[in-house]
Image (tube, rainbow, N blue to C red):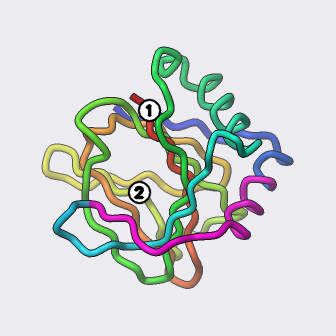
Amino acid sequence: MIRVVDQAFSSEEHLAILQYCRKASYHYGERDKAALPPTGMVSEIDSENPLFMVIAGKILEKFPEVVNLSIYRMYVNCFAPGENPYFHVDGPSGVTVLYYPEEAWDRDEGGETQFLIDGEIRGVLPLPNRLVLFDAAMVHKATSFRARHRFTVAVKCS
């Protein structure tokens, strides 16, 4: 199950999220699996942050199937150009929602989220202002942009 919603936020909300991602404080390393080295940088978005409610509200509006779930984590992933994250699952149950806050995307930049489905890799493009919902148990990974940092807001629900 992968669901995509384009033009998810208003222009003002989209810009506010992008600016937050660019200015946030990050710490190194999210481990996709315990035995693997960390990749990327992470900035947590706590429930006191005004953007938390904006993002959570939009997820509930666009994906009614999450109404009975709880958000247990919201954060920004930041990958440097050329970084190569690992395939992983986010958990045995629940859903993950990703948001792509970029201003523009070019197919030669890369940056898709790849899903391993039935022995094939299928990608979701990181189009600006796009929300993607998927089962947390799906095997997936981020790919980096070629020449700039890639930001993705990740929301974990169970």
Q: Is residue 44 above or below residue 85?
A: above
Residue 108: image x %, image y %?
Answer: 51, 76
Residue 124: image x %, image y %?
Answer: 44, 51
Are dots 1 and 2 in contact, CB under 8 Å? no
Q: Is residue 52 magenta?
A: no
Q: Is residue 90 above or below residue 80?
A: above
Number of marks drawn: 2
Q: Amino acid at mark 2?
A: Thr
Give the camera-side residue of 20 and 83. 20
Give the camera-side residue of 53 and 66. 53
Choose the circle earlier in sequence order: 1 or 2: 2
The span picked out in magenta is 16-32
Kindly identify the residue that appears in the image at 70 percent across and 41 percent down.
Answer: 48
Give the camera-side residue of 14 and 47. 47
Q: Amino acid at mark 1?
A: Cys
The kind of secondary structure element at disc 1 is strand
Q: Residue furthest right?
A: 12
Q: Which of the 4 image quadrants contains residue 40?
A: bottom left
The kind of secondary structure element at disc 2 is strand
Name the residue that disc number 1 marks.
157
Kindly identify the residue that appears in the image at 70 percent across and 34 percent down.
Answer: 53
Q: Is residue 80 left or right of residue 94?
A: right
Kindly identify the residue that appears in the image at 67 percent across and 49 percent down.
Answer: 129
Q: Is residue 45 above or below residue 24?
A: above
Q: Which quarter shows the N terminus?
A: top left
Q: Which of the 4 image quadrants contains residue 104?
A: bottom right
Q: Is residue 157 left or right of residue 107?
A: left
Please tell me how crowded label 1 is: few (under 14), some (14-19), or many (20+) other residues with Cα within 10 Å: many
> Between tags 1 and 2, which lies in front?
1
Q: Is residue 29 magenta?
A: yes
Name the residue that disc number 2 marks.
113
Residue 144: image x %, image y %?
Answer: 45, 73
